[in-house]
Amino acid sequence: MPIPDSIAPPRSLLRERAFASLRGAIVDGTLEPGERLVDSELCTWLGVSRTPVREALARLEQIGLVQVRPGSSTIVSPLDVRAAVEAQAVAASLHELAAREAVPLLKEEHLTAMTTANAAFADALRRADVEDAIASDDAFHRVFVDLCANRTVTAVLDDVTPLLRRMERSRFATLGGRASVRQHRAIVNLARQGQVEATARETRANWLTLKPPLD
C-alpha cells in the first residue's frame, strides 16, 4: 500500500484546535468585545480551512462568546453581566458537587497540589499578573473537578467558565482577589479534615464571591 508523505489531521482535531485558540483569544482580551471576526483572516491566523473555523464559531456562539449575524457579520460578544451571573450560579453549583464527590477520594498529593496552586495564585496577585492568577486558580479548582471524574461536570464547566473569566480579569488585576487566597486555604483545611459538606459549601461560596464585581 502506498504510504502518503503526510497525513492531514482529522477535521475534528482542526475544529478543536480552532475552537480552543479562538476561545483563549476572546477570554484573554486579544479579541475584544464587539470586534468583527472575518473567516478569511481567522483561517490565515489559525492555519486551517474555513470549515473548522465556521464549526468553531458555531460552538462559540452556543456558549455565548460570539454573536453570528446571518448574512452580515460575526462579532465577539460584548461583555454581558447577566450571562456571567447566570454562568456563575452554574459554576458554583458544579464546583460544589465536584468537591462533595472528590473529598472522600483525596490523598495528600492532591492537597499538596492545591496548596501549591494557591501559593502560585497569591504570588500572581501580588505581581498583578492576571494570566498567572487565572491559571493558578484554575489549577486549584481542577483538583476537585478531575478527581470527581464526572464528565458532565467537566463538559459544562468548559462552557461556562470562559464567560466568568472574561468578567473577573479586572478583579484579579487588583487586591480584590486576595480574599480567594484565604478561602482556598480554608477549603484545603476542611478537605484535609474530611469535612465533605463544609468543603463543598466553602467551595461554592468561593465561586459566589465573584458576584460583587459583576454588579
Image (tube, rainbow, N blue to C red):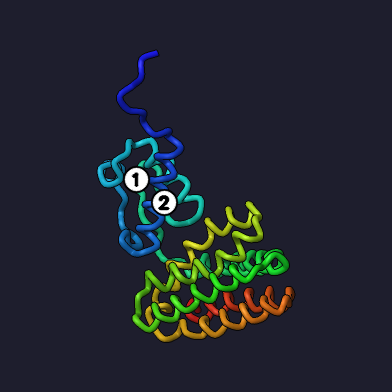
In the image, residue 132 above or below residue 209: above
Q: Using residue 23 as the reference point, say whether residue 148 is left or right of it.
A: right
Asked which quadrant contains residue 123, the reply is bottom left
Q: In this view of the protein, which residue sits in the foreground, 205 or 71?
A: 205
Within 10 angstroms of label 1, few (less than 14), some, or many (20 or more) residues? few
In the image, residue 139 above or below residue 65: below
Q: Residue at x 39, y 71 (%)?
A: 132
Please report whichever mark, 2 or 1, sits nearer to the chain's N-terminal start.
2
Within 10 angstroms of label 2, few (less than 14), some, or many (20 or more) residues? some
Q: Which residue type does callout 1 highlight?
A: Ser
Q: Residue at x 41, y 86 (%)?
A: 175
The quadrant the N terminus occupies is top left
Q: Which residue type does callout 2 highlight?
A: Ala
The image shows residue 43 at horizontal and vertical percentages of: 29, 42
The image shows residue 174 at horizontal and vertical percentages of: 39, 83
Question: For mark 2, what is the residue?
Answer: 20
Q: In this view of the protein, which residue sits in the foreground, 57 or 18?
A: 18
Q: Residue at x 37, y 69 (%)?
A: 131
Disc assigned to residue 72: 1
The image shows residue 115 at horizontal and vertical percentages of: 53, 76
Q: Residue at x 31, y 43 (%)?
A: 39
| Mark 1 secondary-structure assignment | loop
| Mark 2 secondary-structure assignment | helix
The image shows residue 140 at horizontal and vertical percentages of: 53, 70
The CA span between labels 2 and 1 is 24 Å
Q: In this view of the protein, which residue sits in the foreground, 40 or 7?
A: 7
